[in-house]
Amino acid sequence: MPKDAIGPIVQGQGISLTIDGQAVMGNKGQTILEAALAHDIDIPYLCYNPRISKTGACRICLVRVNETMFKTACTEPIAPDMRVVTEDPELTEIRKGILEMLLAEGDHNCLYCDANGACELQNLVMRYDAAMPSGDFPRRHRTIDEASSKGLKRNEDRCVLCGRCVKACAEVQLNNVWQFTGRGGNTHLTSDLDAKIGDSTCVNCGTCAQLCPTGAITLQPVLGRGANWDLKKESSICIYCGVGCKIDFFKNKGGQLVRALGHPDGPNQGHLCVKGRFGFDFIQKPARLSKPLIRENGAFKEATWDEALDFVAARLKEIKAQHGPDAVAALTSAKCTNEDNYLMQKFMRAMVGTNNVDHCARL
Amino acid sequence: MMNRETVSRIVAARGTGRENLMMVLRDLETLSGNNQLSPETLEHVAEEMNLPASAISGFVGFYTMFSTRPRARYVLRVCKSGPCHVMGSGTIFGALEKYLGIRPGQATADGLFFLEKCECLGVCSVAPAMMVNYDLHGNLTEAKIKDLIAAYRAKTPTAAEQSGPEVEGRACVIRSEGQTKRLLETVGRVDPSSIDSFLQHKGYAAVRKALAEYTPEQVLQIVKDSGLRGRGGAGFPAGLKWSFIPKGDMPKYVICNADEGEPGTFKDRILMEENPHLVLEGMLLCGYAIGAATGYIYVRGEFRRAIDRLQGAIAQARAKGLLGQGIAGSAFHFDIFVKEGGGAYVCGEESSLINSMEGLRGYPRFRPPFPAGSGFRNSPTTVNNVETFASTPLIVLNGADWYKSVGTAKCPGTKLFCLSGRLNRTGLAELPMGTTLREVIETHGGGMKDGGKFKFAQVGGSAGGILAADLLDLPLDIDQTLQAGVTLGSGAVLVCGEETCPVDFLLNILSFFDHESCGQCTPCRVGSAQLHHLARKLAGRKAAPGDIDRMVEKALLMKKASLCAMGQSPILPVTTMVRNFRQEFERHGHPDHNCPACDRTLQRLYRAE
């Protein structure tokens, strides 16, 4: 969680407490987990995510409060003089027990899991040395839908029912495609009325996949194109519109872009739309234009920028002189910045002398 | 097939708000003719109510009374919970298979009957019981099943309840000497369908007295002084709970928790069926004390007769000016509405209940915020049990000292005990707090059935502890049971004789928790399923060494880590059962151990799975 999301301590409203013996100041309304993270104190969690409302369901973040009580750090508000212990033998045992329950419930074999190496459950299992429990507990078999959507792959046998996807869809994208249905051990996801995700009202923003702590919902483009630990991250700005979403692109060993995740610090605060999430494959297609082309005798010929611009300027002047300025029109693109678009309409009105200006986003 | 116009008409009648989803779906299921909510119907509902399709799917999938698959004209729901199990519900499944050729999950070829196993129907004194659509029938035998099937073949389904006379409230009250009848004093004498009859028995006198003589603070103080503790099971002081509601002018809600789902408990149903105005009066007093103007009664959907009588009582009270604007000529406004449940034990947990009322899946909410600060519609809300509300008019009318004149020092008043199981007399008895189990069984239950020998009793419902003979003289009140490592809970007393196998009994309880866990938090969702699995292995003489201790460990983890009280419940029956009957448990660990009880259960209830 970015520390500045917590905000500075409001004068006169600070709450002092201790976490693992360390004196900590927090704001009224903060949870134990928020106060801890702001001070680089590590409390493990699964269902919590700063981008969605609190859930309190996975119970991994259970901490000891004032010696006798167990509280979920993600939901419990801090209070003056509260004493919080984030790890002790009993808490470790509880967390390990919960992790082993999750392991027994699903199919959590990292060897063939898409999230291997980038899995929050795996990290916790390693941290707590959890293992498959004995007891021959039957595994829950839930929906596996690998192909109906070009954006998302769904393998609910990897699901820990943390509910991040449900809330991501409802609270971030405001689309409400995901929901839990069934009850108890038979609880599982539904998209719309038990539709396949590809046939549902999903708009492929991919937020559910980005927030999924395991390999239950994954992004299709990366599959089979590199192990998580081989992917290199490069942050960039989305080229599709003027919002300027910050994207973390991931490149595989062969130099191909294979995955896009929303960066938490951009104006998008981690969110992406379908274009930013999936619309990057063109850059590595051979048909992509990388040099200006001028059509001569019905065929395109490569040209330099100087040649191309001189050609365009000459033709615009000719057309204006011969047919008047209204014979020229400009259509600009949402892929340009606001500044680019401003310059284009200024150029058309002031230099060419026409109001024939339009933009693809108007459609 | 349900057309769009029908759905539109029902939604218009019930209201488009999400809070009406339960009733819209109930109406549509009844209209379907085969007790089905088809995907097409649900799509129409989503569009007509402007709700996401996923929300409808999630809602229908949570409440077990609904089905998206076709069932039949009549759904037979046979109770498999503790009291019915002990009293032979297994034979009912056998009889139905014999006469109809169907097992749970199957329909007859003529489309008339669909069989389901269900959890407690709240008529445990006439166990074994079943529900046919919304009609309850008890004291079932093979012969009675045969007659009922024949009768339903000749009938057309109706929305009006046509339950058997044996399940009516007054028929389920024990007539024994030595009861302290306060709540039950007028049962059988008051006509529940007539407000005039209630008025002749000091009806609404407490409300009139409070409005004329007391300030809201004084009413609250009287309830506090009386020491009345919540009768739903947790025993939290009622007056203290009410005092947590913030003062000031804002929407506040009084909710009566009538989702009586704890197996073996049927007291609230009887109060609502026989004395509905007493419950309304208690809610009015609470509303006056905390400054609320609206009350809701959340009744489990299975209690058709109670719902009908409450609806009738509310209409009559409104006509008499005892609900609505300016009650009894005062400046106090209060109205009450009925909400229905859809088949989910967890909705008896107050925050689940609130979510259910809002048209959501019945997931409990994490606390804080507590309902007193942010409950129904995120407004201050108090949720109390039916018996708690029904007690308050008597307290306000007769005073706190009168109330404390019976019971124990810290748990004053009377308690409704729900007697079921292997007793000569089963039903409801009103006894002072602190009555011993021995007196409950011998004096009011008429002793063990057929001269059998007492083996154990489960007190407090499926979430309650097991009391063996060593605790027969334990005074049953809220604190003394806790000190003895058991609980009073809802007041259910399920008595079992020597023939009851503790492993079979525990399997029954743990299958209940597995079925009823909401699935939200990890420990309860996975833990309940794992406990059920371990018990099933043990019942099948297939347990691994250490499985008994593993059960205790799982239940302990659930106790420590679960989100709500439900996940914290299995520990009590598991540990008390294992503590009392460890040897029998260990015998089941041997593959060659003979146990006809476990064999029967596995054969009847697990074969089809």
Image (tube, rainbow, N blue to C red):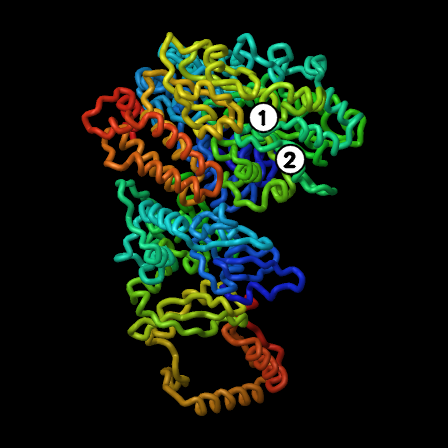
Q: Position of residue A294 (x, y in %)?
A: 41, 85
Which residue appears at 58% of the width and 38% of the height?
B19
Report the chain holding disc 2: B
Label 1, on which residue?
B411
SS category of the residue bearing label 2: helix
Which residue appears at 52% of the width and 45% of the height?
B366
Is there any visible trace of residue B277 in the rendered image? no
Residue contact at pointers 2 and 1, CB within 8 angstroms: no
Q: Is residue B80 left or right of residue B344?
A: left
Q: Position of residue B514 (x, y in %)?
A: 38, 35
Q: Position of residue B433 (x, y in %)?
A: 56, 21
Report the chain holding disc 1: B
Vertical placement of residue B441 versus B353, above or below: above
* Real-space CA distance between mark 2 and mark 1, rounded to the nearest whole angstrom: 14 Å
Instruction: Tell me the quadrant of the picture where the C terminus of chain A can be found.
Output: bottom right
Residue found farthest to the left: B592
Q: How many marks?
A: 2
Of circles 2 and 1, which is in front? 1
Query: Amino acid under label 1?
Result: Cys
Q: Is residue B205 left or right of residue A16?
A: right
Is there any visible trace of residue A282 in the rendered image? yes
Label 2, on which residue?
B240
Vertical placement of residue B122 versus A334, above or below: above
